[in-house]
Image (spheres, rainbow, N blue to C red):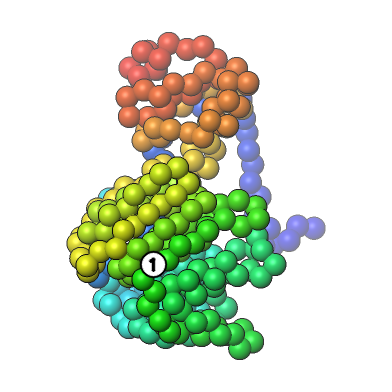
Amino acid sequence: MKDKNYTEAKVQGGKKIVGSVNVVGDKVATVHLLIASLISPERTTIINPHLCGDVLTVLNWMTSNNIAEISTGNGILEINPLQKPFFDLSEISKIRASVCLITPLALRSGKVILEKIGGCNFAERKIDLHLRLAEAFGIRIEQDKNKFYAVRERVPDRVVFNCATVYGPSVGVTCHSLLASMLFDGEVILYNVAKECAPSLLVDYIRLATNRLVETDGDTIKLPRCGSIIYKSVEINPPSDVTVAFTFISAAIATRGSVFINGLVNLPPSILDTLKDMNVSWEFVQSGMFVSAKKQDKASWFCGM
Protein backbone atom coordinates (compact mmCIF):
# COMPACT_ATOMS: atom_id res chain seq x y z
CA MET A 1 0.00 0.00 0.00
CA LYS A 2 1.43 3.35 -1.01
CA ASP A 3 1.78 6.24 1.38
CA LYS A 4 -0.68 9.00 0.46
CA ASN A 5 2.06 11.58 0.96
CA TYR A 6 4.44 9.77 -1.37
CA THR A 7 5.07 11.48 -4.70
CA GLU A 8 6.21 9.40 -7.64
CA ALA A 9 8.57 10.72 -10.28
CA LYS A 10 8.87 8.88 -13.57
CA VAL A 11 12.06 9.44 -15.53
CA GLN A 12 12.10 8.27 -19.14
CA GLY A 13 15.38 8.51 -21.00
CA GLY A 14 16.35 7.89 -24.59
CA LYS A 15 16.59 11.48 -25.78
CA LYS A 16 19.72 13.54 -26.19
CA ILE A 17 20.00 16.88 -24.49
CA VAL A 18 20.72 19.51 -27.12
CA GLY A 19 20.30 23.22 -26.54
CA SER A 20 21.39 26.19 -24.48
CA VAL A 21 20.73 27.15 -20.87
CA ASN A 22 21.20 30.13 -18.61
CA VAL A 23 22.80 29.41 -15.24
CA VAL A 24 22.10 31.46 -12.12
CA GLY A 25 24.84 33.19 -10.16
CA ASP A 26 26.92 31.41 -7.55
CA LYS A 27 24.89 30.47 -4.47
CA VAL A 28 27.52 31.12 -1.79
CA ALA A 29 28.52 34.40 -3.39
CA THR A 30 24.90 35.57 -3.52
CA VAL A 31 24.39 34.83 0.19
CA HIS A 32 27.51 36.78 1.18
CA LEU A 33 26.57 39.67 -1.11
CA LEU A 34 23.27 39.89 0.78
CA ILE A 35 25.19 40.19 4.04
CA ALA A 36 27.46 42.82 2.51
CA SER A 37 24.39 44.77 1.38
CA LEU A 38 23.40 45.17 5.06
CA ILE A 39 26.80 46.59 5.97
CA SER A 40 26.78 49.24 3.28
CA PRO A 41 24.20 52.00 3.81
CA GLU A 42 23.77 52.36 0.05
CA ARG A 43 21.77 50.37 -2.52
CA THR A 44 23.12 47.05 -3.75
CA THR A 45 21.91 45.52 -7.02
CA ILE A 46 22.69 41.87 -7.73
CA ILE A 47 22.35 40.70 -11.34
CA ASN A 48 21.30 37.08 -11.95
CA PRO A 49 21.15 36.10 -8.26
CA HIS A 50 20.80 32.49 -7.13
CA LEU A 51 17.42 32.46 -5.36
CA CYS A 52 18.11 29.26 -3.44
CA GLY A 53 16.65 28.38 -0.05
CA ASP A 54 19.33 30.23 1.95
CA VAL A 55 18.94 33.38 -0.14
CA LEU A 56 15.14 33.33 0.15
CA THR A 57 15.43 32.82 3.92
CA VAL A 58 17.67 35.88 4.23
CA LEU A 59 15.37 37.95 2.01
CA ASN A 60 12.30 36.97 4.03
CA TRP A 61 14.20 37.83 7.23
CA MET A 62 15.11 41.25 5.81
CA THR A 63 11.57 42.14 4.80
CA SER A 64 9.71 40.68 7.80
CA ASN A 65 11.98 42.53 10.23
CA ASN A 66 12.00 45.78 8.25
CA ILE A 67 15.75 45.53 7.78
CA ALA A 68 15.80 46.39 4.08
CA GLU A 69 13.53 47.19 1.18
CA ILE A 70 13.73 44.42 -1.41
CA SER A 71 12.70 44.47 -5.05
CA THR A 72 13.09 41.60 -7.53
CA GLY A 73 12.25 40.97 -11.16
CA ASN A 74 13.81 40.25 -14.55
CA GLY A 75 16.80 38.52 -12.99
CA ILE A 76 17.64 41.50 -10.77
CA LEU A 77 17.67 41.72 -6.97
CA GLU A 78 17.86 45.18 -5.39
CA ILE A 79 18.50 45.75 -1.67
CA ASN A 80 18.02 49.13 0.02
CA PRO A 81 19.13 48.76 3.67
CA LEU A 82 17.19 50.66 6.36
CA GLN A 83 20.20 50.75 8.72
CA LYS A 84 18.60 49.33 11.85
CA PRO A 85 21.05 49.42 14.79
CA PHE A 86 20.36 45.81 15.85
CA PHE A 87 19.33 42.63 14.09
CA ASP A 88 17.73 39.52 15.58
CA LEU A 89 19.65 36.72 13.88
CA SER A 90 17.64 33.80 15.24
CA GLU A 91 15.61 33.42 12.03
CA ILE A 92 18.72 32.91 9.90
CA SER A 93 20.75 30.96 12.45
CA LYS A 94 20.71 27.80 10.30
CA ILE A 95 22.53 29.61 7.52
CA ARG A 96 26.28 29.21 7.97
CA ALA A 97 27.06 32.65 6.54
CA SER A 98 25.09 34.36 9.34
CA VAL A 99 28.19 34.04 11.55
CA CYS A 100 29.82 36.64 9.29
CA LEU A 101 27.60 39.31 10.84
CA ILE A 102 29.21 39.00 14.29
CA THR A 103 32.11 41.38 13.76
CA PRO A 104 30.44 43.92 11.44
CA LEU A 105 27.43 44.36 13.76
CA ALA A 106 29.59 44.66 16.86
CA LEU A 107 31.82 47.22 15.13
CA ARG A 108 28.76 49.22 14.17
CA SER A 109 26.61 49.09 17.31
CA GLY A 110 29.12 48.31 20.05
CA LYS A 111 27.31 45.22 21.37
CA VAL A 112 25.52 42.30 19.80
CA ILE A 113 23.65 39.39 21.33
CA LEU A 114 23.74 36.26 19.20
CA GLU A 115 21.77 33.07 19.68
CA LYS A 116 22.16 29.80 17.77
CA ILE A 117 24.39 31.48 15.26
CA GLY A 118 25.58 29.64 12.16
CA GLY A 119 29.11 28.63 11.28
CA CYS A 120 31.15 25.71 9.97
CA ASN A 121 31.88 22.28 11.35
CA PHE A 122 35.54 22.06 10.37
CA ALA A 123 36.93 22.64 13.86
CA GLU A 124 36.38 21.27 17.35
CA ARG A 125 34.36 24.36 18.16
CA LYS A 126 32.05 25.15 15.27
CA ILE A 127 32.79 28.87 15.05
CA ASP A 128 36.09 29.11 16.94
CA LEU A 129 38.01 30.74 14.11
CA HIS A 130 35.21 33.25 13.53
CA LEU A 131 35.25 34.17 17.22
CA ARG A 132 39.03 34.62 17.18
CA LEU A 133 38.60 36.86 14.16
CA ALA A 134 36.12 39.03 16.07
CA GLU A 135 38.61 39.29 18.93
CA ALA A 136 41.31 40.40 16.49
CA PHE A 137 39.04 43.30 15.50
CA GLY A 138 38.72 44.31 19.17
CA ILE A 139 35.48 42.45 19.91
CA ARG A 140 35.24 40.59 23.23
CA ILE A 141 33.27 37.38 22.97
CA GLU A 142 31.39 35.98 25.96
CA GLN A 143 29.34 32.80 25.94
CA ASP A 144 26.39 31.91 28.17
CA LYS A 145 24.97 28.52 27.20
CA ASN A 146 23.64 29.03 23.64
CA LYS A 147 24.06 32.79 23.62
CA PHE A 148 27.07 34.79 22.55
CA TYR A 149 27.72 38.39 23.53
CA ALA A 150 29.96 40.33 21.18
CA VAL A 151 31.12 43.61 22.70
CA ARG A 152 33.35 46.18 21.02
CA GLU A 153 36.07 46.64 23.60
CA ARG A 154 38.88 48.34 21.72
CA VAL A 155 39.78 49.64 18.27
CA PRO A 156 43.10 48.17 17.11
CA ASP A 157 45.35 50.03 14.69
CA ARG A 158 45.69 47.00 12.46
CA VAL A 159 44.41 43.46 12.11
CA VAL A 160 46.59 40.59 10.90
CA PHE A 161 44.76 37.28 10.63
CA ASN A 162 45.29 33.75 9.33
CA CYS A 163 42.13 32.64 7.53
CA ALA A 164 43.02 28.94 7.38
CA THR A 165 41.84 26.02 9.49
CA VAL A 166 43.79 22.77 9.79
CA TYR A 167 42.00 21.73 6.60
CA GLY A 168 43.13 24.75 4.59
CA PRO A 169 41.85 28.26 3.80
CA SER A 170 38.31 28.90 5.05
CA VAL A 171 35.83 30.52 2.68
CA GLY A 172 33.62 31.63 5.58
CA VAL A 173 36.43 33.18 7.63
CA THR A 174 37.87 34.95 4.59
CA CYS A 175 34.43 36.39 3.81
CA HIS A 176 33.89 37.33 7.48
CA SER A 177 37.22 39.18 7.49
CA LEU A 178 36.42 41.09 4.30
CA LEU A 179 32.95 42.04 5.53
CA ALA A 180 34.40 43.32 8.82
CA SER A 181 36.87 45.47 6.89
CA MET A 182 33.92 47.40 5.47
CA LEU A 183 33.43 48.92 8.94
CA PHE A 184 37.07 49.10 10.03
CA ASP A 185 39.29 51.89 8.70
CA GLY A 186 42.57 50.50 10.06
CA GLU A 187 45.01 48.32 8.18
CA VAL A 188 43.87 44.73 7.53
CA ILE A 189 46.23 41.96 6.42
CA LEU A 190 44.73 38.55 5.72
CA TYR A 191 46.83 35.56 4.78
CA ASN A 192 46.02 32.00 3.76
CA VAL A 193 42.81 33.38 2.26
CA ALA A 194 40.34 31.28 0.32
CA LYS A 195 40.22 32.02 -3.41
CA GLU A 196 36.78 30.63 -4.20
CA CYS A 197 34.05 32.65 -5.87
CA ALA A 198 32.47 34.18 -2.75
CA PRO A 199 35.58 35.86 -1.24
CA SER A 200 36.83 36.87 -4.69
CA LEU A 201 33.52 38.57 -5.42
CA LEU A 202 33.54 40.31 -2.03
CA VAL A 203 36.90 41.82 -2.95
CA ASP A 204 35.25 43.23 -6.08
CA TYR A 205 32.27 44.40 -4.01
CA ILE A 206 34.44 46.31 -1.52
CA ARG A 207 36.32 47.98 -4.36
CA LEU A 208 33.05 49.03 -6.00
CA ALA A 209 31.01 49.89 -2.89
CA THR A 210 33.65 51.69 -0.80
CA ASN A 211 36.77 53.80 -1.17
CA ARG A 212 38.89 51.09 0.46
CA LEU A 213 41.94 49.95 -1.47
CA VAL A 214 42.14 46.15 -1.67
CA GLU A 215 45.48 44.63 -2.67
CA THR A 216 45.73 40.93 -3.53
CA ASP A 217 48.95 38.96 -3.77
CA GLY A 218 48.69 35.18 -3.96
CA ASP A 219 47.09 33.95 -0.75
CA THR A 220 47.31 37.37 0.94
CA ILE A 221 44.85 40.27 0.93
CA LYS A 222 45.82 43.67 2.27
CA LEU A 223 43.62 46.69 2.93
CA PRO A 224 45.71 49.74 3.87
CA ARG A 225 44.49 52.20 6.49
CA CYS A 226 42.09 54.80 5.16
CA GLY A 227 40.96 58.09 6.69
CA SER A 228 37.25 57.31 6.63
CA ILE A 229 35.17 54.82 4.70
CA ILE A 230 32.89 56.24 2.03
CA TYR A 231 30.10 54.07 0.61
CA LYS A 232 28.30 54.18 -2.72
CA SER A 233 25.64 52.24 -4.59
CA VAL A 234 26.87 49.21 -6.47
CA GLU A 235 25.72 46.80 -9.16
CA ILE A 236 27.40 43.41 -9.26
CA ASN A 237 26.96 40.20 -11.23
CA PRO A 238 28.05 36.92 -9.57
CA PRO A 239 29.74 34.33 -11.81
CA SER A 240 27.68 31.32 -12.86
CA ASP A 241 27.11 28.66 -10.22
CA VAL A 242 29.52 25.86 -11.10
CA THR A 243 27.41 23.18 -9.37
CA VAL A 244 24.33 24.08 -11.38
CA ALA A 245 26.36 24.32 -14.58
CA PHE A 246 27.90 20.91 -14.03
CA THR A 247 24.43 19.43 -13.58
CA PHE A 248 23.64 20.38 -17.17
CA ILE A 249 27.06 19.21 -18.32
CA SER A 250 26.49 15.84 -16.65
CA ALA A 251 23.08 15.51 -18.31
CA ALA A 252 24.66 16.19 -21.71
CA ILE A 253 27.32 13.56 -21.06
CA ALA A 254 24.79 10.98 -19.85
CA THR A 255 22.65 11.38 -22.98
CA ARG A 256 25.59 11.86 -25.37
CA GLY A 257 24.16 15.23 -26.21
CA SER A 258 25.48 18.78 -26.19
CA VAL A 259 24.76 21.98 -24.32
CA PHE A 260 25.80 25.60 -24.49
CA ILE A 261 25.88 27.28 -21.08
CA ASN A 262 25.42 31.03 -21.35
CA GLY A 263 27.59 33.09 -19.04
CA LEU A 264 29.89 30.25 -17.96
CA VAL A 265 33.34 31.57 -18.81
CA ASN A 266 35.51 29.35 -16.63
CA LEU A 267 35.61 26.08 -14.70
CA PRO A 268 38.10 24.70 -12.15
CA PRO A 269 41.01 22.88 -13.85
CA SER A 270 40.07 19.66 -12.05
CA ILE A 271 36.67 19.61 -13.78
CA LEU A 272 38.17 20.39 -17.18
CA ASP A 273 40.70 17.58 -16.70
CA THR A 274 37.85 15.22 -15.83
CA LEU A 275 35.97 16.14 -18.98
CA LYS A 276 39.10 15.52 -21.01
CA ASP A 277 39.60 12.10 -19.42
CA MET A 278 35.99 11.24 -20.33
CA ASN A 279 36.62 12.17 -23.99
CA VAL A 280 34.13 15.01 -23.71
CA SER A 281 34.84 17.94 -25.97
CA TRP A 282 34.47 21.42 -24.56
CA GLU A 283 35.32 24.94 -25.59
CA PHE A 284 34.77 28.40 -24.18
CA VAL A 285 33.22 30.33 -27.05
CA GLN A 286 31.38 33.61 -27.39
CA SER A 287 29.89 34.33 -23.95
CA GLY A 288 29.71 30.84 -22.55
CA MET A 289 30.85 27.23 -22.71
CA PHE A 290 30.04 24.58 -25.29
CA VAL A 291 30.12 20.94 -24.15
CA SER A 292 29.53 17.91 -26.36
CA ALA A 293 29.72 14.21 -25.59
CA LYS A 294 30.64 13.50 -29.19
CA LYS A 295 32.20 15.34 -32.09
CA GLN A 296 29.79 17.86 -33.47
CA ASP A 297 29.79 20.77 -35.86
CA LYS A 298 29.55 23.70 -33.44
CA ALA A 299 28.77 26.10 -36.29
CA SER A 300 25.59 24.19 -37.17
CA TRP A 301 24.72 23.93 -33.48
CA PHE A 302 24.81 27.71 -33.11
CA CYS A 303 22.52 27.99 -36.10
CA GLY A 304 19.82 26.17 -34.16
CA MET A 305 20.51 22.50 -34.76
Could you tell me which quadrant the N terminus lies in? Answer: bottom right
Residue at figure coordinates x 56%, y 52% from the top left:
169
Residue 45 position in % (x across, y down): 26, 57
Q: Amino acid at mark 1?
A: Arg
Up the image or down, 254 lies above or below 34; here it is above
Furthest residue toward front: 157
Please say if 270 is above or below 8: above
Q: Specify whether 92 is left or right of 39.
A: right
Residue ID at (61%, 27%): 274
Res 303 quadrant in image: top left
Q: Can residue 205 be spotted in the picture?
A: no
State the image quarter where residue 233 is shown.
Answer: bottom left
Where does the image place residue 28, in percent across and percent down from the top left? 47, 54
Mark 1: few/some/many CA within 10 Å (<14, 14-19, 20+): some
Residue furthest out toward the right? 1
Residue 39 in percent (x, y) is at: 32, 69
- Return the residue at label 1: 158
Tell me, yes or no, if residue 305 can be seen here: yes
The residue at the point 52 percent across, 58 percent down is 163
**Residue 23 point in image, percent of width and height:** 41, 41
Instruction: For the C terminus, give its image quadrant.
Output: top left
Judging depth in this view, the residue of 12 and 185 nearest the camera is 185
What secondary structure is marked by label 1? strand
| Viewer-proximal residue among 202 and 272 | 202
State how many labels appear: 1
Q: Residue at x 43, y 84 (%)?
A: 153
Which of the two residues, 73 or 175, is positioned nearer the viewer here?
175
